Amino acid sequence: MKRDPIYGMMAEFDSAQALLDAAHKTYQSGYRKIDAYSPFPIEGLADEIGFHHNSVPLVVLIGGIIGGCTGYLMQWWMSAVDYPLNIGGRPTHSWPSFIVITFEMTILFAGLSAVFGMLALNGLPMPYHPVFNVSRFAMASRDRFFLIVFSSDPKYNAPQTRSFLETLQPRSISEVPS
């Protein structure tokens, strides 16, 4: 009989403080690929599960630089190379007149890259996620708190991870099938 691969091991907790304490102990025990789910934001939870790196500012910076360069080069190409016009003795490459559009393109590209970068880095849209296979996970949007240790974690070993999660005194522990 073939078993489905396991996505991870999930523990259910009754309170936000219990989840916060469990996340801290799990991270301190050496598990690095963990995630937490709660019905509302919990201050400090991201730090407890080791989520410190955020790539969205870098994506926005790159998008803004690309937008600014695009705006400036587009205007330069149009006025100096593609269709140069001598109007009132103004030079064809008049950079002060390019500032407004360059600024607007920087803001536009930075804003769009923020939205699409955030969606891509969060893996959205995600119509299916393996945690939905656990029936008790429906309570995550109401009044329950969940901590999952992914099977891709180097320290993950199903029996040892289960026994570790039992020491955290959760309400229940479930295997999450892929």
Image: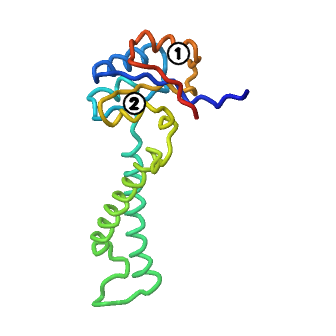
Q: Quadrant of residue 93?
A: bottom left
Does residue 69 lie above or below 12 as drawn? below
Whether pointer 1 and pointer 2 mark residues with C-beta atoms closer than 8 Å, the reply is no
Tell me where residue 54 appears, x and y as whole percent: 39, 38
Give the crowd class for mark 1: few <14, some 14-19, many >=20 residues within 10 Å.
some
Asked whether 6 or 112 is in front, the reply is: 6
Asked whether 4 or 90 is in front, the reply is: 4
* Residue at mark 1 to residue at mark 2: CA–CA distance: 21 Å
Does residue 158 lie above or below 133 as drawn? above
Point out which mark residue 161 bears: 1
Tell me where residue 174 appears, x and y as whole percent: 49, 23
Specify the amino acid type for callout 1. Thr
User: Is residue 29 found left or right of 60 in the rendered image?
Assistant: right
Does residue 75 lie above or below 172 as drawn? below
Tell me where residue 68 appears, x and y as whole percent: 37, 63
At a point 38% along the width and 51% down the height, the residue shown is: 61
Residue indicated by mark 2: 51
Does residue 129 lie above or below 127 as drawn? above
Q: Earlier in the sequence, mark 1 or mark 2?
A: 2
Q: Given this view, does label 1 or label 2 mark the residue nearer the observer?
A: 1
User: Is residue 98 found left or right of 147 in the rendered image?
Assistant: left
Name the quadrant of the N terminus.
top right
At a point 57% along the width and 26% down the height, the residue shown is: 151
Specify the amino acid type for callout 2. Phe
Tell me where residue 144 appears, x and y as whole percent: 33, 28
Asked whether 116 or 16 is in front, the reply is: 16
**Residue most toward the right?**
1
